[in-house]
């Protein structure tokens, strides 16, 4: 795939003791069939005590300190410092195996000027753990957030598709290899201390920018969790972030959802039976039994989020 106009790009990667993943992540960038002088890599490090920064230096990364540790703060710092035409938010446990990945990602945004950005698909492999395959198949690894996202219109192009939402709908995307339309970010982002993808994509959609592209045959492999304990820790972390935001009266992408929908989604996840039926259907469609963890993850997430929501209500 030849791209005559080869814009500059910055990969923004938050890290904290990411030694076990960061080398493979950076190797995926290093193999890209793209001019090396057009690529910069920002490692937004939250104070790693292992060999994360040492490994990053081997790949000529720019190491930038993230004093507040949390990834969303690091992303905000990186975006502000980036001078490239575009930037890509990549997590340290995201693996790219295709040398043409970057060219495939760049192609749609050079054609579709008003899209939010370009999302890479999540790939699955047999050697991936049950939970990691499940998270990739869901695309949105949070089973409750996934149910709040609006279903977009799908517009097929030659080498990619456009997912087009209606104005005001919710879009949960923006991380794990997402290439951002920097012009829209510069125009609408308030340059605050944090950059939270789901909140910002939903805000852009309120402003009428509701579409993003997904290239064909373009994948990121995500080492999301190792086991169910890790999954629970991630869900508790997300619940804690929600509680913190609501306590501080910070707006989130969930604010305008009706209480009735929140209750129905919660009851659906707690029911066990309905998620099991969905798991059976999707396991047949995707030919992957990883879907059978779905009732368990739905139930756990619903319990944790309900507790957090009630706790916020009591505080409020």
Image: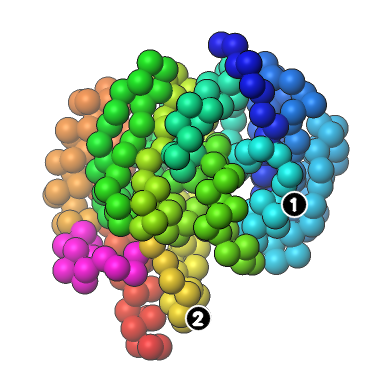
Main SS class of the magenta portion in the image: helix
What residue does disc 1 label? 81
Q: Are marks 1 and 2 in contact (CB under 8 Å)?
A: no
Image-quadrant location for residue 123: top left
Between disc 1 and disc 2, whose residue precedes?
Answer: 1
Residue 118, x across and y down, in percent: 48, 35
Indicate the secondary structure of the residue bearing disc 2: loop
Indicate the secondary structure of the residue bearing disc 1: helix
Is 159 positioned to the left or the right of 9 in the image? left
What residue does disc 2 label? 248
In the orientation shown, which residue stands out farthest toward the top? 1
Residue 243, x across and y down, in percent: 45, 74
Q: Quadrant of the N terminus?
A: top right
Whether residue 210 is situated above or below residue 254 in the rendered picture: above
Residue 97, x across and y down, in percent: 59, 21
| Segment tinted magenta in the rendering | 254-266
């Amino acid at each position: 795939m030849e791209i005559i106009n080869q814009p500059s790009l910055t990969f923004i990667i938050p890290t904290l003791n990411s030694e076990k993943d960061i080398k493979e992540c950076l190797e995926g960038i290093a193999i890209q069939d793209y001019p090396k002088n057009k690529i910069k890599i920002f490692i937004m490090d939250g104070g790693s005590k292992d060999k994360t920064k040492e490994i990053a230096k081997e790949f000529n990364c720019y190491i930038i300190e993230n004093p507040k540790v949390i990834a969303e703060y690091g992303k905000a710092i990186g975006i502000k410092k980036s001078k490239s035409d575009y930037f890509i938010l990549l997590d340290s446990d995201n693996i790219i195996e295709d040398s043409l990945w970057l060219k495939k990602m760049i192609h749609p945004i050079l054609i579709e000027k008003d899209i939010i950005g370009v999302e890479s698909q999540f790939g699955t492999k047999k050697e991936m753990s049950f939970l990691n395959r499940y998270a990739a198949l869901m695309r949105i690894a949070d089973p409750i957030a996934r149910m709040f996202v609006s279903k977009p219109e799908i517009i097929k192009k030659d080498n990619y598709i456009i997912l087009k939402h209606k104005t005001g709908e919710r879009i949960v995307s923006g991380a794990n290899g997402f290439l951002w339309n920097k012009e829209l970010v510069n125009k609408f982002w308030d340059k605050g201390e944090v950059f939270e993808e789901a909140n910002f994509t939903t805000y852009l959609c309120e402003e009428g920018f509701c579409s993003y592209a997904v290239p064909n045959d373009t994948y990121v492999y995500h080492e999301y969790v190792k086991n169910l304990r890790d999954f629970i820790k991630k869900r508790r972390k997300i619940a804690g972030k929600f509680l913190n935001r609501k306590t501080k009266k910070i707006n989130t992408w969930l604010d305008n959802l009706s209480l009735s929908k929140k209750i129905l989604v919660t009851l659906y996840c707690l029911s066990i039976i309905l998620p099991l039926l969905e798991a059976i259907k999707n396991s047949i469609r995707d030919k992957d039994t990883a879907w059978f963890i779905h009732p368990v993850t739905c139930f756990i997430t619903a319990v944790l989020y309900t507790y957090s929501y009630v706790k916020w209500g009591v505080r409020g």
